[in-house]
Amino acid sequence: MTGIYFDGAVRLKTYSAVTKGAKATIKIELEATDRYDLASILRQLDEIDRDQRESSMPAPKTSRPPGRKAQLALPAPRLALEDHRERDT
């Protein structure tokens, strides 16, 4: 679950909700008196947005295996030597 964290320099100003069918939109208005807290909240919102975009993107396609298996090398041919041991001369 995602959360936004802030301390006393940021206050909740207003909030509202609107529903249309099965979806609901919540609007939250915050008031920041410290620019560092403002930057922190904006960074958190940016991270939430990035995480949601990455999770909705399809997974990268992995390389498909080739249609055929790789051809294996054959052993070297036998030497053409003749056996002269049983030959009568």
Image (cartoon, rainbow, N blue to C red):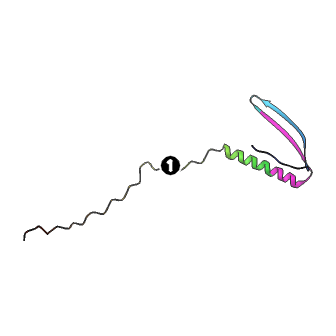
Residue found 83% across the figure and 53% down from its top:
40
Question: Is 63 left or right of 76, judged from the image as shown?
Answer: right
Question: Is 79 left or right of 55, judged from the image as shown?
Answer: left
List x then y, in percent, for residue 72. 37, 57
List x then y, in percent, for residue 6. 86, 49
- Give the residue at the far left of this rendering: 89
Residue found 24% across the figure and 66% down from its top:
79
Say few, some or many: other residues with alpha carbon within 10 Å of mark 1 (under 14 / 14 to 19 / 20 or more).
few
Q: Is residue 46 above or below residue 85?
A: above
Q: Which residue is mark 1?
A: 64
Residue found 80% across the figure and 52% down from its top:
43
Q: Judge whether residue 28 is colored magenta.
A: yes
List x then y, in percent, for residue 24. 78, 33
- Give the residue at the far top of this rendering: 21
Residue found 81% across the figure and 46% down from its top:
4
Q: Amino acid at mark 1?
A: Arg
What SS does tag 1 mark?
A: loop
Split into 4 quadrants, where in the image is the N terminus?
Answer: top right
- Give the residue at the far bottom of this rendering: 89
Say which of 4 and 39 sits in front.
4
List x then y, in percent, for residue 32. 90, 49
Image quadrant in which you'd find residue 14: top right
Q: Is residue 55 above or below residue 17?
A: below
Split into 4 quadrants, where in the image is the C terminus?
Answer: bottom left
Q: Judge whether residue 89 is colored magenta.
A: no
Which residue range is magenta in the image? Answer: 24-42
